[in-house]
Amino acid sequence: MSAGHHDVSYLAPKETLFKTVWSWVYTIDHKKIGVMYLCAVLAMFFLGGVFALLLRMELWEPTKTTVEGVTGTFLPTVNTADGQQITVNNMYNRMFSLHGTIMVFLFIIPSIPAALGNIFLPIMLGAKDVAFPRLNLMSWYTYVFGGVFALYSLIAGGVETGWTFYTPYSTTTNWGNVTSMVLAAFILGFSSIFTGMNFIVTVHKLRVPGMGWFDMPLFVWAVYATAIIQVLATPVLGITLLMVVFERLFHIGIFDPALGGDPVLFQHFFWFYSHPAVYIMILPGFGIISEILAVHCRKRLFGYRAIAFSSIAIAAISFLVWGHHMFTSETAVANVVFSALTFLVAIPTAIKVFNWVATMYKSSISWTTPMLYAAAFLFCFTIGGLTGPPLATLATDIHLHDTYFVVAHFHYVMMGGTVLAFVGGLHHWWPKFTGRMYNENWARLGCILVFIGFNVTFFTQFFMGTLGMPRRYATYVDEFTTWHQVSTVGSWILGIGFLIHLMVFLQSLVAGRKAGANPWGGLTFEWEAASPPIEHNFSHEPVMTHGPYDYDTALPPHCDPKDFPLPDPALVRRVHGAH
Amino acid sequence: MSTVPAPTLDMDLPPHARHVPQAHWRNAKDEAEAAKLGMWLFLATEILLFSGFFCAYAVFRMMYPGNWHAASSYYLDWRIGFANTIVLLLSSFTVVLAIRGAQTNRNWMIVVNLAITNLCAIFFLVVKLGWEYWPKIQKGELPGANFDYGNAQGSHDHIFLSVYWISTATHGFHVLVGIFVITWAMIKAMNKHYGPKHYTSLENVGLYWHIVDVIWIFLFPLLYLV
Amino acid sequence: MASHAHHHAEHHKHPDFDPDETLSLDETHEDHGHHATPFWTMFIVFALLLFLTVITVFQSRIPTDIMPETMHIIAAVGIATIKALLVGAFFMHLKYDKPMNTVVMSATIFAVILFIGFCVLDLGARGVVERKEAGDIYTGGNLKLYAGSIKPEDKRPNHPLVAKPDGSITEAARKDHAAEHGNEGHGDAGHAPAPADAAHGEAKPSGH
């Protein structure tokens, strides 16, 4: 309760090594849980990335593969009951399935909310911790438990079903270890639910006194909207995957056409969760971009309320559009309804993009790594967003369904959106939660390589998709060779870019310059805390003296006003109008 | 927040009167309301979990309208479902009385009512297992591919039974979990952890139990009656 | 009702922070448990729930030539909804609690309606829109094939055990069952279908 050892950094080691380890293993500190999540999701990101690189290597040549031996080493074979040969095609199926399941369930869903959200959401609200710290710890161990199941499945032969586990294949196949992978996703869903519940209650009940809903940073709004989806959509995934497990174990027949069940019902169940889930993945990214743009452009965010409400609107609309994943399998009536509703998503999303661009207008941009990432995000996410309507349109979707166009669209939104925002946010808050600065120039180089590599990898896939290259195939006709090879070269550039980031982070941890409390001149509460924050975040409960983005009127805490001066009032008037 | 000295506690008071909020809460009221909001969010997830079964029910009933009602009345005895419904409603009512016991500081009322609730829950499970599940297993009235169609009534009995088994089994599992949490609350009540100032976890146990009841309120007519 | 007035006063105070609250333990009782659940209200609700349960049973006994099956379902779900609302409003204190809990529940119910509604819109309309009967979807399989008791090579178009589009899986299976056991053998434990593993281990379903 009182002063003393609580005023030291949350990263400070305890008296003995054992106590230090124990203070992490049995911590209820949201920052420590967030850091553990961060390490785990980064490990999963690199694991999933290795699978992606192998996939791209396999696709270097149209039919035979140059990396048969390599993949064989990475993925041990399993004995199938009927002694079937495991071909390189099976290996390919397994790799894209593992890439998908690991990236979706173990990396991207927990990436921003559970890692960065856990660390920063309570601090941004001026709170000491999340509402239910023990539930938070339980969420982390649930994640670990689910991860163990997933890794077991990986070692025991992997899955060939893709990350979507479509029935009847997932309920009848004997390849690999589908049951444990499905259970892994089931368990990971609970981890996500616990995090979501915790964040909703935290936002409702732990805002610092005087902080109204519209005084909250937009990252909090975004994570709050995410949490709504996590709580309302994830249980349906739980029950769906449980039924798949029952189907595999007891043949209950709900999803099995051989028994009068319906595989399309599975698709409905699955996408009722998994379409909102892509907003679980992207919404926190939106929040990070809002933070980065405000801080590194040093300008009041344009259209605060519009951005805040559009997050909630996206969360609400996300429940109305899942059928657009099933245009080739559902009936015409549902097709028309879902297609029409899908276009609604474009409205709040475009509102956000326009507001971000308007924020950058006439602002004083400092091209730090986070800002570079935010700019890269705007570019890539806009492409990803604008390739959505062709897929939402019934006629074009029939042509583009299950082609590389979908792969490219998805990666432009998820990787060009969420991952770029995540890495940008990681750089933005790195000084805060580690207390160390990173090497700006090397990080910028990494960012540029990632940006180039990403676009080379995936822009080609738009062309391949429109030309008819189907997704999930290990082989292809010769005409696509050049496209595939360009895409593969892009994946190498991408890989090098991320390796540079890894090196930059490791270098920073070992030998980075000590960070001040507020290196970027931010106004939100996390920049009032020390770097790294003390165990209870603040030595005194922070006081709301200005809005989160009042760069026109408020001087940032812990900063020399010479470094971060107030803008020229005349300019402010010209940009914002009188107010 | 300024640091406050640890309050001196009067150890003669019962535990419920000595409750101090966890360190990150600004006051006990926020803590209690947060716990309840968190519980409601959890109940939301429970409802959506079960909505999968109701969705499957609706879809298959529309898909196979022919013999659904016939299968329902052949395989299920409405009297068993009725008895279990009454028992669950009674148990919900006793949970309400237990909370009233906490509010009016009558500890015996909490313990006795929770005990009745638990007896009802056990009755429910015994009836379910002994009079429904066990005869069904013996007669091969099992879901999907395990269904013994030697005495089938219609073309899609096994789908009806699939829906019946997975929904009631999941519900039964929730009843089982309910027995454990009610017992936990009972032990807390015996140790005088609940009083008019502090009974949030009892309330949350009650909320959980009510949602189990509400789910059964829907399952009973849909599976046994219509 | 005086307690209710007090209750609302509390609402208005929140979320303003009162620094004294953390200091004083005596404050805490003001925060919580300011209304005792009214016994007789709850008892009446309980009685209503019992009454509605009886009603729903009676309603289900009405013959279908008087009340069509669809009406039966609507009535049953309607009565169940009333019961659920009673439990929610009174037993679960939604009527007395902060409105946020009701908001959470409403959002949940909204999500459930969307979920079931859209699934039914699609799958329930399949026979109408696509002019296909549900039987079409399982022509690739068969119960017995699945349970592992016949081999994939037995599966040929005119084999009696292959499902027909008219949905007579069970009919075919029943005949097969009768042929195996001599008569209309009502299943006992010994005749339970092959264990789940059989389908898993050996029989490869067609199509892969």
Image (cartoon, coloured by chain):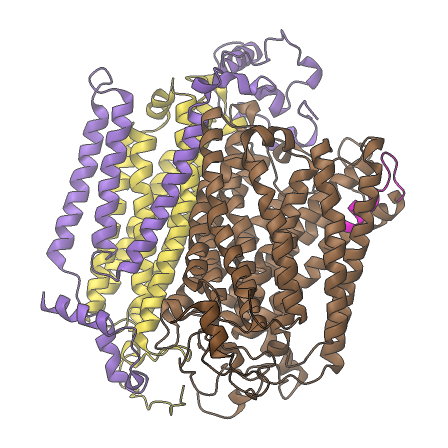
Chain colours: A brown, B yellow, C purple
Q: Is residue A58 magenta?
A: yes
Q: Is residue A415 above or below residue A168?
A: below
Q: Residue A515's spot in the image, x, y percent?
A: 64, 83
Residue A13: which quarter of the image?
bottom right
For image coordinates 73% across by 53% down, the residue present is A454
Residue A2: which quarter of the image?
bottom left
Segment tinted magenta in the rendering: A52-66
Q: Residue A371's spot in the image, x, y percent?
A: 63, 67
User: From the viewer's perspective, is A40 left or right of C88?
Assistant: right
Residue A442: which quarter of the image?
bottom right
User: From the viewer's perspective, is C205 left or right of B45?
Assistant: right
Q: Residue B137's spot in the image, x, y percent?
A: 46, 31
Tell which residue pokes out farthest to the top in this image.
Answer: C158
Q: Is residue A389 above or below residue A143?
A: above
For image coordinates 18% across by 69% down, the residue present is C7
Q: Is residue A61 above or below residue B33?
A: above
For image coordinates 63% across by 20% down, the residue present is C149
Residue A25 appears in the rendering: yes
Q: Residue A464's spot in the image, x, y percent?
A: 74, 37
Residue C102 vs residue A493, the one in the foreground = A493
Residue B146 vs residue A483, the one in the foreground = A483
Residue B214 vs residue B58, the one in the foreground = B58
For image coordinates 16% across by 54% down, the residue present is C42
